[in-house]
Amino acid sequence: MMFLLLFLSEVFACDSLGDQLNPQLKKKLDDYNKFIISLQNEKDPLKAINKRIQSHGLLMDAYINEKLVKNYPSSFTDDSISGSRKMFLRNTKLPPGLSNDIIYEISANDSTKPLRSWQIPANHTFQGIRGNEILHQGYLGTPCSQFKRDVLLAIATNGSFRAIPDVKFPEAKYGIKCPAAKSIFKGSDFGSCVEMIDVKSRKKRIIVFQNPMT
């Protein structure tokens, strides 16, 4: 698997985080950055990443109920518009008080009832589907990172996720007619549907999602 490794700066700096950078968070971010840099010397980066997911989690975005922010001292925000915060997650299905974006699969014959759903990191997109996993092209890094590294994550319906080798995504059809978008995302004007080709079975799949608000 080929990773994209980008050199961002010569020094480790988190000035943009201001007073959010408490000692506990700084230690976690220092450790995470060292892990990312160490991947360039790993014989099997995917194995190392998946081991890290189980032991520490990956830095991802989620929404936190404002009243509960104090319960997550190792979370921080670099996005004041969406209200999402970054934290280390081992699972995208989150406990009460935390939430992620939810996407659904519907049948072409019966679009009124979702077949399955996934939680994906807040304010992120998905690029493909394979069986019961939605595929998300993300990256490993922090606002403090010297390096960022691309990583393809496969997210299961139960919220577990893993790093997988790169795949070639078949062309998707966005903006298809889909009444289910309004019925599933009631009260939202951002619901939309896309027809994707399963990268494994090559079958057509229809995904209902909300376009990220920009």
Image (tube, grey):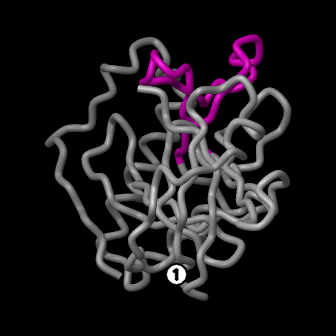
Q: Residue 97, image x and y in percent?
A: 80, 27
Q: Residues within 10 Å of mark 1 (few under 14, many from 20)?
A: some
Residue under the point 49% across and 23% down: 77
In which quarter of the view is residue 115 placed? bottom right
Q: Residue 33, image x and y in percent?
A: 38, 49
Q: Residue 12, image x and y in percent?
A: 26, 37
* Residue furthest bottom as drawn: 201
Q: Amino acid at mark 1?
A: Val
With 33 as the anchor, is 134 left or right in this view?
Answer: right
With 51 as the anchor, is 211 left or right in this view?
Answer: left
As rendered, which of 40 and 67 lies closer to the eye?
Answer: 67
In which quarter of the view is residue 179 placed? top right
Residue under the point 76% across and 18% down: 68
Taking 71 as reference, is 151 above or below it? Answer: below
Identify the residue position indicated by label 1 in the image: 199
> Which quarter of the figure is the N terminus placed in?
bottom left
Taking 18 as reference, is 75 above or below it? Answer: below
Residue under the point 64% across and 40% down: 101
> Which quarter of the figure is the C terminus placed in?
top left
Question: What residue range appears in magenta?
Answer: 59-88
* Residue furthest left as drawn: 10
Residue under the point 58% across and 39% down: 210
In which quarter of the view is residue 79 placed? top left
Q: Is residue 63 magenta?
A: yes
